[in-house]
């Protein structure tokens, strides 16, 4: 698992949530809801991830409840990148 | 007194604040009061769509059956107005604090320009409804509930001066909502679940009947599209959205999901109370075929609003036919099963 990809994802979350800093304080093991994401910001994050990593989420994978933690989301991104 | 907060809780029923507020008070007492859950599942069954949306816009385009949801067994409601409070020459902050002290929450409109965490804070004047559920008299802050700047239904705070400005501003900006409603929870209220009523209302939804005709003795029926026919109205809305002929309104797709989530909770309640045989899996099937699909469609539409991919909207328009059919077949089977089961003594199932 790339540290760089982790940092990128943390940074994107930070941007979507309009927080200060670069997102280093966001735990990869924290629940997405606890981080502050909800249905709208999650979809915004998906669009940012798609643009940044050059992947496309399947429609059925657009549901936030499918990912418990940020690490689950990163795992999904990595699976897409490996295909 | 320094800190006073009345009980409120976020819930599934929140697409529009006029019913989200009274329900937020009710559901905060649901664990201690079984009747609240029975009442909730006896309501929010019918859906209605106001087709005037396509002729220029309406404040409530797609929503539950239009009814004053504060009219329930647990809320003591006082219906006042800005005009009355003005006539009595009451200082609004003193009135709010006294009302809270007497056990009431307050539902009124205020100018979002002055309310932190609201969508139009320091951006533009906008009259929007808000629930006041608490106060800190030492810090001179009010505890509020409503939609925040991320379109999330949640709690937030405002200082006395901020709220006073937000209230007074409605005298000079465009405002059509002059209500000041006071809600106080009364634990002695009661409500008994009636399975046949709920099944009748589910059939109203399935066969797109005008539920307001049941109340003709009170008022003329509402001219709306009802029940499953509202899905065709949503499809028409999405088609116009895709063609750039109507504005994006998140409430329409959010309410679609809310209706399915409410039905899913209702089915789980019916299973738990043994009105349905849980082994037949009505709730699980509904979760997969209807609620899960609606959730995906909402997120697809939101994503299209961000990345302007209209193909995704077209896909949702087509898929809604299948969701409608799946929902219809499942609920028809469920109603038949529940009626057969209700005809037998309940002890057979215990």
Image (cartoon, coloured by chain):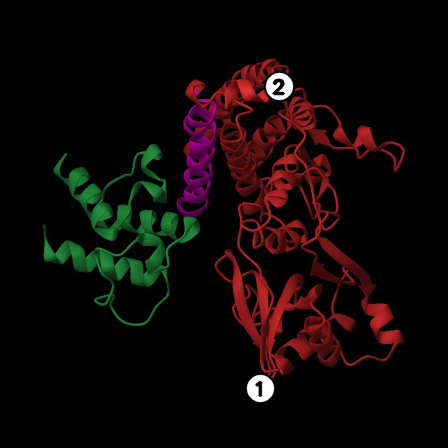
Question: Quick one: A6 or B237, which is closer to the camera?
Answer: A6
Task: Give, as a single range, the part of the protein colored magenta.
Answer: B281-309
- Give yes or no for residue B304 being in the magenta stretch: yes
Residue B334 horizontal/vertical position (percent):
55, 19
Real-space CA distance between mark 2 and mark 1, rounded to the nearest whole angstrom? 56 Å
Q: Residue at x 58, y 19 (%)?
A: B338
Question: Quick one: B341 or A74, which is closer to the camera?
Answer: B341
* Residue under label 1: B138
Horizontal side, residue B30 vs residue A36: left or right? right
| Up-down relation of residue B115 to residue B186 (above or below) | below
Horizontal side, residue B93 vs residue A55: left or right? right
Chain shown in red: B
- Chain letter behind tag 1: B
Main SS of the magenta segment?
A: helix
Q: Residue at x 66, y 50 (%)?
A: B19
| Up-down relation of residue B29 to residue B126 (above or below) | above
Residue B289 horizontal/vertical position (percent):
43, 25
What label does residue B342 carry, if any? 2
Residue B314 horizontal/vertical position (percent):
47, 29
Please tell me whether mark 2 sits on a helix, a strand or a loop: helix
Q: Earlier in the sequence, mark 2 or mark 1?
A: 1
Quadrant of the rendering where the N terminus of chain B is positioned: bottom right
Please tell me whether mark 1 sits on a helix, a strand or a loop: loop
| Up-down relation of residue B142 to residue B260 (above or below) | below
Residue B77 falls in image quadrant: bottom right
């Amino acid at each position: 698992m790339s540290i760089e990809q982790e940092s990128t994802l943390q940074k994107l979350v930070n941007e979507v949530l309009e927080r200060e800093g670069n997102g280093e304080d966001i735990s990869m093991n924290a629940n997405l809801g606890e981080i502050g994401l909800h249905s709208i910001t999650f979809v915004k994050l998906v669009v940012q991830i798609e643009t940044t990593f050059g992947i496309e989420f399947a429609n059925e994978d657009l549901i936030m409840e499918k990912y418990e933690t940020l690490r689950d989301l990163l795992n999904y991104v990595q699976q897409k990148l490996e295909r | 007194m320094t800190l006073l907060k009345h009980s409120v809780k976020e819930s599934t029923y929140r697409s529009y604040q006029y019913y989200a507020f009274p329900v937020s008070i009710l559901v905060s007492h649901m664990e201690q009061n079984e009747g609240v859950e029975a009442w909730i599942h006896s309501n929010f069954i019918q859906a209605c769509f106001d087709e005037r949306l396509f002729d220029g816009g309406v404040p409530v385009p797609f929503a539950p059956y239009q009814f004053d949801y504060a009219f329930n067994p647990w809320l003591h409601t006082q219906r006042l107005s800005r005009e009355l409070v003005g006539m009595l020459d009451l200082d609004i902050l003193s009135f709010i604090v006294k009302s809270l002290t007497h056990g009431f929450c307050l539902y009124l409109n205020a100018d979002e320009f002055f309310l932190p965490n609201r969508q139009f804070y320091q951006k533009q004047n906008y009259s929007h409804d808000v629930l006041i559920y608490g106060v800190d008299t030492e810090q001179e802050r009010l505890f509020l509930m409503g939609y925040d700047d991320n379109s999330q239904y949640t709690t937030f705070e405002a200082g006395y001066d901020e709220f006073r400005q937000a209230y007074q501003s409605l005298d000079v900006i465009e405002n059509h909502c002059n209500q000041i409603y006071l809600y106080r929870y009364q634990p002695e209220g009661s409500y008994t679940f009636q399975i046949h009523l709920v099944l009748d209302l589910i059939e109203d939804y399935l066969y797109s009947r005008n539920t307001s005709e049941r109340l003709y003795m009170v008022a003329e029926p509402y001219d709306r599209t009802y029940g499953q026919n509202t899905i065709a109205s949503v499809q028409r809305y999405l088609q116009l959205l895709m063609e750039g002929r109507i504005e994006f309104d998140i409430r329409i797709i959010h309410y679609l999901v809310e209706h399915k989530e409410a039905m899913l909770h209702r089915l789980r309640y019916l299973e738990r109370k043994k009105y349905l045989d849980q082994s037949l899996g009505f709730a699980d099937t509904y979760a997969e075929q209807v609620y899960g699909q609606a959730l995906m469609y909402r997120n697809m539409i939101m994503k299209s609003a961000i990345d302007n991919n209209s193909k995704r909207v077209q896909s949702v328009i087509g898929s809604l036919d299948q969701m409608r059919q799946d929902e219809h077949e499942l609920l028809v089977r469920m109603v038949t099963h529940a009626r057969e089961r209700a005809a037998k003594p309940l002890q057979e199932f215990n």
